[in-house]
């Protein structure tokens, strides 16, 4: 089953219910325009985000081609989330989409271009490795109620998860639990990198906590993996100015961190951006659920979005999680986090 077909089956199944939020769809009050170096290609690209019509959602515009910010056009790619349509690709969309989702910008046109007019593959600028630049730009122009092409406002819906789901890959997992509010609990574990170690962070991003505690967290990488990534044609634009880099033996190479658990918080930022692709017709993308991720990433997030990989979990308990995961690390912290959910 394709990713598109998988998501369509999820949208039409009993696993998700679309319910009114009591709010109208929003858009930007004006245009924002930012330019900068990209992480993987190292090229400079320019992005202009403009107000959109209600009911049309978020979509990219590139050389007169329109690519909706939807799971239907998402493709697996190393170390980032990529949207593809008709041979055109836009990479590293997760930080921008995370900011738009968290700030409630439901409808907008995202125009993107590079200095090379021959490119069929573009990338969103990385800036300092966080979503701060986008949040600041959105705050400057503000937002307003979006109207459709007939001048009418449109009610905003949100997807509610009706039954527990999980996806497992080796010692990584994502669990979705029905909830009356959006909550994210994220854990990471780097036992061979003492400066990172095992971290947990939990937040409801649909409030001020996103700006204060998530948006400014930067992408991170391990120093020992840099050469391998460069050989693979990745992070050509990477530097100590747009990522925090940690060595297994020397610790952080460009301190200070903005938070002691900044790497874990950045995983939450990415998760929000990836799950924003659930959005359709200008409604909320991130499901109303408690999403628990451990040692996750873009690829595992994509697995969770596709029900051919997700598994229903009737009668979920934290004992079931540990028995099914059969992982080798110390479960004390993760058990505690999961136990609080059930």
Image (cartoon, rainbow, N blue to C red):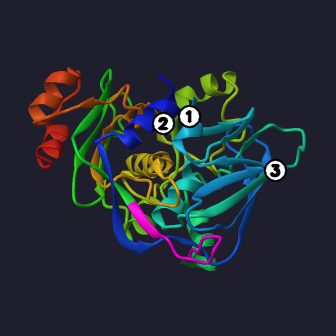
How many labels sit on residues?
3
Residue at (68, 76) in percent of width and height: 30
Mark 1 near mark 3, Cβ–Cβ under 8 Å?
no
* Figure check: 92 above or below 211: above
Residue behind mark 2: 298
Residue at (52, 52) in percent of width and height: 218
Instruction: Work out whether residue 126 or residue 178 is closer to the camera in this orientation and state it.
Output: 178
Q: Tell me the element at label 1.
A: loop
Q: Residues within 10 Å of mark 3 (few under 14, many from 20)?
A: few
- Mark 2, mark 3: which one is toward the viewer? 3
Residue 301 visible in the shown view: no
* Figure check: 103 above or below 176: below
Q: Position of residue 221 (x, y in %)?
A: 52, 37
Mark 2 near mark 3, Cβ–Cβ under 8 Å?
no
Q: Residues within 10 Å of mark 2 (few under 14, many from 20)?
A: many
Q: Earlier in the sequence, mark 2 or mark 1?
A: 1
Q: Which residues are magenta?
A: 145-157
Q: Tell me the element at label 2.
A: helix
Residue behind mark 3: 64
Q: CA distance from mark 1 to mark 3?
A: 27 Å
* 165 to the left or right of 282: left
Residue behind mark 1: 79
Q: Position of residue 84 (x, y in %)?
A: 66, 36
Residue at (52, 33) in percent of width and height: 4
Residue at (26, 61) in percent of width and height: 181
Q: Residue 324's quadrant in the figure?
A: top left
């Amino acid at each position: 089953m394709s990713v598109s077909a998988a998501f369509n089956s999820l949208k039409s199944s009993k696993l998700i219910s679309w319910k009114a939020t009591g709010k109208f769809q929003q858009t930007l009050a004006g245009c924002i325009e930012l330019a900068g170096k990209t992480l993987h290609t190292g090229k400079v690209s320019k992005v202009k985000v403009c107000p959109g019509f209600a009911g049309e959602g978020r979509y990219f515009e590139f050389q007169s081609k329109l690519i909706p910010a939807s799971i239907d056009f998402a493709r697996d790619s190393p170390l980032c989330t990529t949207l593809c349509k008709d041979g055109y690709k836009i990479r590293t969309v997760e930080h921008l989409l995370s900011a738009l989702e968290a700030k409630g910008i439901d409808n907008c046109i995202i125009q993107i271009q590079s200095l090379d007019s021959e490119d069929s593959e573009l990338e969103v600028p990385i800036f300092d490795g966080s979503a701060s630049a986008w949040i600041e730009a959105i705050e400057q122009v503000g937002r307003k109620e979006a109207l459709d092409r007939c001048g009418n406002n449109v009610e905003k819906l949100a997807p509610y998860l009706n039954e527990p789901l999980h996806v497992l890959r080796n010692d990584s997992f994502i669990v979705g639990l029905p909830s009356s509010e959006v909550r994210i609990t994220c854990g990471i574990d780097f036992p061979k990198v003492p400066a990172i170690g095992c971290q947990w962070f939990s937040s409801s991003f649909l409030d001020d906590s996103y700006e204060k505690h998530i948006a400014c967290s930067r992408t991170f990488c391990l120093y020992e993996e840099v050469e391998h990534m460069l050989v693979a044609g990745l992070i050509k634009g990477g530097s100590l100015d747009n990522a925090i880099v940690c060595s297994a033996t020397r610790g952080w190479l460009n301190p200070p961190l903005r938070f002691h658990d900044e790497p874990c918080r950045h995983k939450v930022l990415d998760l929000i951006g990836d799950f924003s692709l659930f959005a359709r017709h200008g409604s909320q993308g991130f499901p109303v659920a408690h999403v628990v991720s451990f040692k996750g990433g873009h690829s595992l997030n994509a697995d969770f979005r596709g029900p051919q990989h997700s598994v229903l979990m009737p009668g979920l308990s934290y004992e079931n999680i540990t028995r099914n995961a059969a992982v080798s690390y110390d479960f004390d912290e993760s058990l505690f986090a999961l136990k609080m959910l059930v």
